[in-house]
């Protein structure tokens, strides 16, 4: 494939493939039965980008980068001239006034409907617990999908997420007729300079109403034996995934069971990293780590079989990965959670809960709703931003 020289003054990504791998891509790596439901989204969609605009929001600067592919031209000079011309065209776009867009009206309140009634979700949780009691699994992550009719501007939704649910991975992937807009807190896999890293997130509490309650809830979360056991299991699963393509003895746990806070929830987070074996590349790493144990359960294969049996629909992008694979061979993928799927005048958000032996089905149902709440709020906030934009145009 294409390779680019490493440029120290540029960030990790400056050209390559950007897109998503849907949850059903696991069938490329493992033998699993065909999922139920209609295929609405492609199992995977990535595009190659040679021209990149890099914004530095801290310094309020921008860089324009064009990758020069020498093998496509007769000489290095020709490749350089072509890349320079592409940079100049992008500069011209920056200098030109942006054409006004007609704002779209959107409902201020979103009426969500789930693909499962409360009693149906409770029922599949009970079934999963029976499998766990029989020793077939340790944990199974069961999700529900919430859908609403709403004409949402994707970039307004992205702006809203930046305001109300900032996370390490913010993204807006648009193509004709559909868009993924997300604010994922969780790394699936980071791969750079011969090192790989995963960051399991498991264990959830709502945010407190004030700093004191927030601290109490964080302490309660860290002391919860069930949450700690679930998190430890997923750390071990992450270590096992990395050991499949990392050097023997190199896989280590860094920060262990720390609290990370987001707008509506807090989580327990750990870091696991290792040195990659000679000859292993980003795709070897992806095959070993996909999907994240935090979105499937453990053991992975049996947990995914149970998910396939119990969930009524394909997951699509949810539970897969979103991010980039750079020309230099580095990769950074987030787990596709806390994400809006926008398509055909509808928005969809999906959220799951990790089911274990002593899970309370009603509590797990409420956890899925709590996780989706910040994303639903982003849709409503996007409507407010769209209305404000419309007012500016009318002024």
Image (cartoon, rainbow, N blue to C red):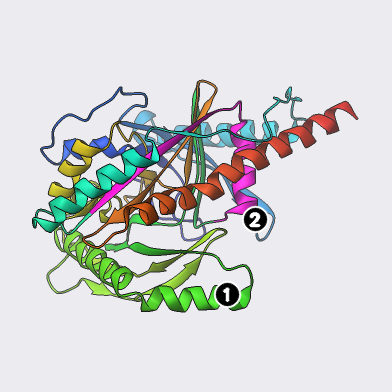
Magenta-colored stretch includes residue 290: no
- Label 1 environment density (alpha carbons within 10 Å; few <14, some 14–19, many ≥20): few
Instruction: Determine the image quadrant of residue 253.
Output: bottom left
- Going from N to C along the chain, the mark reached first, 2 or 1, is 2
Q: What is the number of callouts on the image?
A: 2
Give the residue at x 37% y 52%: 362
| Residue 329 appears anywhere in the view | yes
For this orientation, the residue located farthest to the right is 395
Q: Quadrant of the N terminus?
A: top left
Give the residue at x 17% y 59%: 138
Give the residue at x 39% y 41%: 118
Instruction: Determine the image quadrant of residue 202.
Output: bottom left
Residue 243: mark in rendering: none
- Label 2 environment density (alpha carbons within 10 Å; few <14, some 14–19, many ≥20): few
Which segment is the magenta one? 140-166
What secondary structure is marked by label 1? helix
Residue 124 image offset from top left, x and y in percent = 26, 43
Q: Is residue 111 left or right of residue 38?
A: right
Residue 101 image offset from top left, x and y in percent = 73, 24
* Real-space Cα separation, disc 2 to disc 1, in angstroms: 32 Å
Identify the residue under disc 1. Answer: 213
Identify the residue under disc 2. Answer: 57
Residue 154 image offset from top left, x and y in percent = 58, 33
């Amino acid at each position: 494939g294409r390779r680019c020289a490493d440029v120290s003054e540029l960030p990790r990504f400056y050209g390559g493939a950007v897109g998503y791998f849907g949850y059903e891509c696991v069938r490329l790596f493992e033998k699993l039965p065909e999922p139920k439901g209609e295929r609405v989204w492609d199992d995977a969609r990535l595009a190659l980008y040679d021209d990149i605009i890099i914004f530095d929001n801290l310094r309020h600067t921008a860089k324009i980068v064009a990758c020069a592919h020498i093998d496509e031209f007769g000489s290095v000079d020709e490749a350089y001239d072509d890349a320079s011309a592409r940079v100049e065209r992008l500069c011209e776009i920056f200098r030109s006034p942006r054409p006004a867009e007609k704002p779209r009206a959107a409902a201020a309140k979103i009426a969500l409907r789930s693909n499962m009634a409360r009693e149906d979700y409770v029922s599949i949780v009970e079934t999963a617990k029976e499998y766990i009691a029989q020793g077939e699994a340790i944990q199974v992550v069961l999700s529900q999908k919430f859908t609403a009719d709403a004409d949402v501007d994707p970039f307004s939704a992205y702006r809203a997420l930046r305001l109300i649910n900032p996370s390490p991975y913010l993204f807006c992937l648009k193509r004709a007729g559909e868009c993924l807009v997300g604010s994922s807190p969780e790394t699936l896999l980071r791969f750079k300079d011969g090192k790989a890293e995963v960051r399991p997130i498991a264990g959830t509490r709502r945010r407190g109403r004030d700093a004191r309650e927030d601290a109490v809830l964080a302490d309660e979360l860290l002391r919860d034996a069930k949450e700690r056991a679930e998190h430890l299991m997923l750390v071990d699963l992450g270590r096992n995934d990395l050991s499949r393509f990392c050097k023997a003895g190199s896989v280590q746990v860094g920060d262990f069971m720390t609290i990370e806070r987001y707008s509506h929830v807090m989580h327990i987070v750990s870091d696991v990293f290792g040195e990659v074996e000679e000859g292993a590349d980003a795709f070897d790493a992806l095959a070993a780590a996909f999907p994240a144990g935090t979105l499937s359960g453990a053991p992975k294969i049996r947990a995914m079989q149970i998910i396939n049996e119990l969930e009524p629909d394909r997951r699509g992008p949810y539970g897969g990965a979103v991010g980039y694979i750079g020309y230099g061979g580095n990769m950074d993928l987030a787990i596709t959670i806390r994400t809006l799927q926008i398509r055909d005048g509808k928005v969809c958000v999906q959220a799951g809960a990790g089911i274990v032996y002593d899970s309370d089905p009603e509590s797990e149902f409420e956890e899925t709703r709590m996780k989706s709440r910040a994303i639903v709020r982003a849709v409503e906030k996007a409507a407010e931003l769209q209305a404000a934009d419309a007012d500016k145009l009318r002024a």
